[in-house]
């Protein structure tokens, strides 16, 4: 029952995400009469589906690295399930509230704030140093992308509009749409293309956040089926094993040895992966020891299906600890030969391939949830974007400029594995075109949007922390 409820909550988050973020993609085509609302939301939902299906999963698993290591490794425990429920409920509550008020707030900010709240609460409740459960390094990367993306949207969309005015002299492009009349065919084609691009980019970026959470739930509840990528081929396993042996040999030759059992090595690396922890002389030895364990489990296997179900969760844990520890060890400036760094990069790609996978049915479920949300709740956010940001009606050129910049920005972020907000990029792009066109902006709307953006993170941090604490208390009282 808990498993099914968690899956429904993850899909519910994506439905609400559709209210917010996907609605931005259709705002311009609706308010320029390029597509009728019903057709626009169905078209956008279709391209969200395609975007989700072709996504590479980098954003999905990037979100998971923000979570406390102990809870990621033990997501099937009571504390792990409390984490999943609290961050999802917190994100859904805030998204529903801002949607009801017609404020295009960021689902990315909402989810990340909830994750940080869980991490902070976990550090307090586990008697650690406050904030130790948060991956601040990864959080800084995410904050930078979320902060810069609306600035890029505002500036680039405004500049693109000015460039269009300089190069394209067609007056119709800069006129407000005639009521109930579609634009000329070539303008209509541009607007539909940009709507399609934003929808596709949104699906490939924002859709991955729900996929990451779905995988976390599946790994915790059904590790025998989802801990390892069963599609890994015999050749890929052989290459993984070869690189594992090479990494172990290098570490054993170049670093101090320590007599650690595999369980002690796992504990050493679990502590090492906490934020602000530096390596000690036992760290390389722990990586090598756990790596040898990993080799022993893979030796002679032709498929991941050859590994007994009972051993798969432990193998996944070993892979996670070795993978993340090698990454952190090299990032902290350890003096190593370039040949070893290259070997580690190839090895980590193999490790990721064995655990970073998303079944097609998960992608389809998330895509359908996104599309359903768009079709049900699109109007509140669309009205804000189309009517309440600028003082004048949105022109064809303004809509196309904002959407084109959003499409490119989100697409680049997707390739880099960075979660950005479609809402922030597109709405700031619309505001940028209004400013560049000297149309003026409605300051009440802009002020409310900025306040929603500013308060989203702290509010969701508080909600996530409070719900996580309440969940753990309820679990202890019920004796689960």
Image: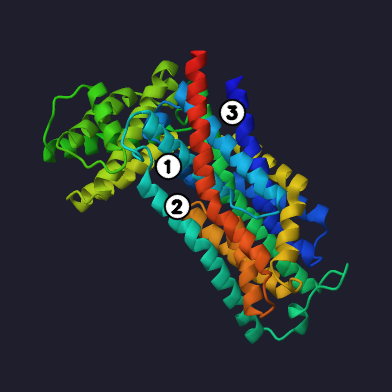
Q: Using the numbered discs, state the Cα–Cα distance from disc 3 to disc 1 in whole angstroms.
A: 19 Å
Q: Toward which corner of the image does residue 200 lie, by quadrant? A: bottom right
Q: Are marks 2 and 1 in contact (CB under 8 Å)?
A: yes
Between 395 and 185, the one nearer to me in the picture: 395
Which comes before the other along the chain, label 2 or label 1? 1
Can you give x and y, in whole percent of width and height, for residue 210 in the image? 57, 40
Which comes before the other along the chain, label 2 or label 3? 3
- State whether residue 3 is above or below residue 23: above
Q: Which mark is residue 66?
A: 1
Q: Toward which corner of the image does residue 424 lie, by quadrant? A: bottom right
**Residue hosting label 2:** 142
Element marked by disc 1: loop
Between 320 and 478, the one nearer to me in the picture: 478
160 lies left or right of 178: left
- Residue 421 appears anywhere in the view: no
274 lies left or right of 39: left
Q: Which mark is residue 6?
A: 3
Within 10 Å of the Cα at label 1, are there few (<14), some (14-19), or many (20+) other Cα atoms? Answer: many
Can you give x and y, in whole percent of width and height, for residue 445 in the image? 67, 63
Which comes before the other along the chain, label 3 or label 1? 3
Element marked by disc 2: helix
């Amino acid at each position: 029952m808990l498993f099914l409820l968690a899956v429904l909550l993850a899909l519910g988050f994506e439905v609400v995400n559709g209210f917010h973020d996907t609605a931005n993609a259709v705002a311009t085509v609706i308010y320029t009469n390029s597509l009728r609302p019903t057709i626009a939301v169905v078209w956008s939902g279709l391209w969200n589906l395609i975007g989700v299906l072709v996504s590479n999963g980098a954003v999905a698993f990037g979100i998971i690295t923000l979570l406390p290591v102990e809870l990621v490794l033990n997501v099937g425990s009571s504390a792990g399930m409390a984490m999943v429920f609290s961050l999802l409920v917190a994100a859904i509550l805030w998204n529903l509230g801002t949607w009801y008020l017609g404020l295009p707030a960021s689902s990315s900010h909402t989810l990340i704030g909830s994750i940080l709240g869980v991490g902070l609460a976990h550090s307090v409740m586990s008697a650690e140093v406050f904030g130790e459960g948060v991956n601040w390094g990864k959080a800084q990367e995410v904050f930078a992308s979320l902060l810069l993306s609306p600035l890029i949207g505002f500036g680039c969309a405004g500049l693109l509009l000015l460039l269009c005015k300089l190069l394209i002299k067609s007056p119709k492009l800069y006129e407000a749409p005639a009521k109930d009349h579609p634009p000329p065919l070539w303008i209509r084609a541009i607007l539909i293309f940009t709507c399609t691009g934003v929808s596709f980019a949104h699906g490939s970026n924002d859709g991955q956040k729900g996929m990451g959470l779905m995988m976390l739930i599946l790994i915790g509840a059904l590790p025998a089926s989802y801990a390892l990528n069963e599609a890994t081929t015999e050749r890929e396993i052989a290459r993984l094993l070869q690189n594992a042996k090479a990494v172990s040999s290098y570490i054993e030759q170049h670093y101090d040895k320590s007599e650690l059992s595999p369980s002690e090595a796992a504990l050493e690396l679990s502590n090492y992966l906490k934020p602000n922890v530096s390596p000690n002389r036992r760290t390389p030895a722990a990586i090598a020891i756990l790596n040898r364990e990993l080799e022993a489990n893979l030796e002679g296997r032709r498929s991941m299906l050859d590994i007994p179900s009972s051993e798969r969760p432990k193998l996944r844990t070993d892979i996670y600890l070795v993978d993340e520890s090698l990454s952190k060890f090299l990032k902290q400036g350890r003096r190593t030969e370039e040949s070893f760094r290259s070997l580690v990069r190839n090895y980590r790609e193999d490790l990721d391939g064995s655990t970073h996978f998303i079944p097609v049915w998960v992608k389809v479920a998330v895509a359908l949830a996104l599309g359903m949300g768009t079709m049900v709740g699109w109007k509140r956010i669309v009205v804000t974007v189309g009517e309440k940001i600028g003082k004048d009606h949105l022109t064809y050129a303004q809509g196309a400029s904002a959407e084109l910049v959003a499409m490119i920005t989100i697409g680049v972020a997707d390739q880099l594995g960075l979660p950005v907000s479609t809402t922030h990029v597109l709405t700031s792009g619309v505001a940028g075109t209004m400013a560049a066109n000297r149309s003026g902006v409605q300051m009440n709307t802009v002020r409310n949007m900025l306040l929603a953006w500013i308060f989203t993170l702290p509010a969701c941090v508080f909600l996530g922390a409070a719900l996580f604490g309440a969940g753990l208390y309820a679990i202890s009282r019920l004796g689960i």
